[in-house]
Amino acid sequence: MKSLKRTPNFEISRIVHGHWRLNDWNLNKKELLKLTQQCMELGVTTFDHADIYGNYSCEKLFGDALSLKPELRKKIQLITKCGIKLQSDKYPSRTLNHYDYSFNHIISSVENSLKNFQTDYIDLLLLHRPSPFFNPEEVAKAFSDLKKSGKVLHFGVSNFNPQQFETLNTYTDEELVTNQVEISPLCLEHFNNGNIDYFLEKKIQPMAWSPLAGGQLLKPTNEKEYRIFKMLTKIAEELNINSIDKLIYAWLLKHPVGIIPIVGTQKIERIKNAIEATKFDLSLEQWFKIYTASTGTNVP
């Protein structure tokens, strides 16, 4: 499976393994290390985290597993995010969920992530969500400091719109390398808010979180989900694809913007399905049939 070159010296695997629910998988260190190595053998070398995942526990779980075989560190790409401050038993003084993109918080968050991962660098740091209180000069200063110290190699954002992305990009020393957003046949938001067009213009390959819509497309519960599910089932039969998730990943992968799906599962067969989707090719008409099944109307 080919990787995607984001800069001359930085690549992301075509499929990324997401660890949002890692804490729920109940894997011990050896089991998580085995899963990580299985992913790597399949060509999945990029692993997505955030400081807050699992009530601030998932980074450390992964770092503890990686410590069993530290030589793997140089063969993988670690992504993590910062900026959300959650009410948590680990931070009892907080009375409200909020965002913090101050210089001090970004730096301290990275220091915590490095400690959790038991590494001395993060491959890619993302700002987790846009904030109504945001000082791009301070963020850029933090990015510059982290880059010069070698603690973070590359930077990006998550859930930003084009204007928010462009604003921060004008302040940073280096170009932001990606924007991680929700994309699935159920969530077409970024086809409508200008993001997909912006990604194409700037040659940015977005990362897609929740590509299966949290499983809603596999187990539909409302009219829209059933409508999409019915179309997915029909096209899967046409293409002789034996699993709907493969078709969903193929639908994402076909788009010329270069969507990078994040697959958040402990089941290696599900990860293999995402990889196998790279071998399928929908017709343009089939792609639009899934798109219009989501919107509920034909294109004008």
Image: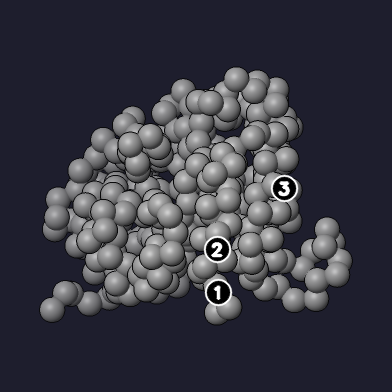
Helix, strand or loop at mark 1: loop
Q: Looking at the image, is mark 3 or mark 1 earlier in the sequence?
A: 3
Tag 3's secondary structure? helix
> Which residue position is annotated with label 1?
134
Choose mark 3 or mark 2, whichever is in front. 2
Residue 99 position within the rendered picture, expressed as x and y whole percent measured from the top left: 64, 70
Of label 1 and label 2, which has the lower sequence position?
Answer: 1
Q: Tell whether label 1 touches label 3 (CB within 8 Å).
A: no
Between residue 61 and residue 101, name the one nearer to us. Answer: 101
Q: Which quadrant of the figure contains the N terminus?
A: top left
Between the C-alphas of marks 3 and 1, the distance is 22 Å
User: Contact, CB < 8 Å: mark 3 with mark 2?
Assistant: no
Residue 105 percent coordinates (x, y): 68, 61
Callout 1 amino acid: Phe
Name the quadrant of the C terminus: bottom left
Residue type at mark 2: give it: Val
Horizontal arrangement in the rendering, residue 89 relative to residue 85 (left or right): right
Quadrant of res 192: bottom left
Query: Which comes sooner in the sequence, label 3 or label 2?
Result: 3
Q: Which residue is mark 2?
A: 139
Q: Would you place residue 171 above or below residue 51 in this image?
A: below
- Residue at the spot x=60%, y=20% of the render? 71
Residue occupying image coordinates x 63% and y 62%: 103
Q: Which residue is mark 3?
A: 112
Is residue 53 in sight in this rendering? no
Using a 10 Å C-alpha cutoff, classify the residue at mark 2 as few (fewer than 14 neighbours), some (14 to 19) or many (20 or more).
many
